[in-house]
Amino acid sequence: MSAALFRWISDSALADWVVDSPYTWPALESIHFVSLCVLFGSVMMIDLRLIGFFRAPCAGMVAFLVRLSLCAFAVNLATGVLFFFGNTYKYVDNPAFELKLLLILAAGGNALFFKLRLGHVVEGNSVTTGSIAIGYLSLLFWSGVIICGRMITFYAR
């Protein structure tokens, strides 16, 4: 991305709204954190089922948790974009932020693989080698997203 684009983002009215009010940034932080807890909690329940816990058929519960995690992810995405607008240069060329984005993409690919290839696992009481791998990878990716999110401040330039 170009420097002109980053300058436009940081000079926008949206950026001013995020940083000028003493309440906006803290409110966004709180919303981001709570929705991250909902996201990680719902994903963790699905992953634990894929790994072999809760072996009873639970397709209905998993469908609900998938919808819940998608809603929580949408809230996190919206607040994350607002953070980016509010402090663009904190995130540009930040290795923790870049790794966080890569891990989110990897977690999304992992979830897509689950949906397309392993969704049937939750309809029965079985576990496969693939479902175990997908469950552990998801936990690893989302834990990495959380850690990288916390590290962004320490790698800001």
Image: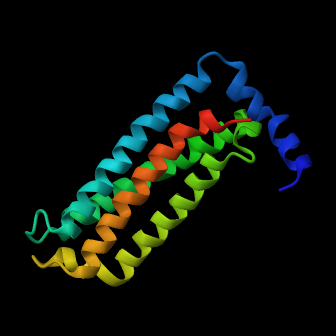
State the image coordinates of residue 144 (x, y, percent, origin top left).
45, 52
State the image coordinates of residue 122 (x, y, percent, origin top left).
19, 74
For residue 61, side relative to residue 113 (left or right): left
**Outermost residue, top side:** 22
Residue 152, quarter of picture: top right
Indicate whether 28 appears above or below 126: above
- How was this image coloured? rainbow
Indicate whether 83 appears above or below 95: above
Point out the image quarter for the C terminus. top right
For residue 104, side relative to residue 156 (left or right): left
- The number of numbered discs placed on residues in the rendered structure image is 0
For residue 142, side relative to residue 16 (left or right): left
**Outermost residue, bottom side:** 117
Query: What residue lies at 59% left-to-right and 18% top-to-bottom?
Result: 23
**Outermost residue, right side:** 4
Indicate whether 154 appears above or below 114: above
Query: What residue lies at 81% left-to-right and 36% top-to-bottom?
Result: 10
In depth, the one of 157 and 117 nearer the eye is 157
Query: What residue lies at 77% left-to-right and 38% top-to-bottom?
Result: 89
In depth, the one of 17 and 132 nearer the eye is 132
Residue 142, quarter of picture: bottom left
Point out the image quarter for the N terminus. bottom right
Residue 111, quarter of picture: bottom left
State the image coordinates of residue 54 (x, y, percent, origin top left).
11, 63
Query: What residue lies at 34% left-to-right and 58% top-to-bottom?
Result: 139
State the image coordinates of residue 155 (x, y, percent, origin top left).
65, 38
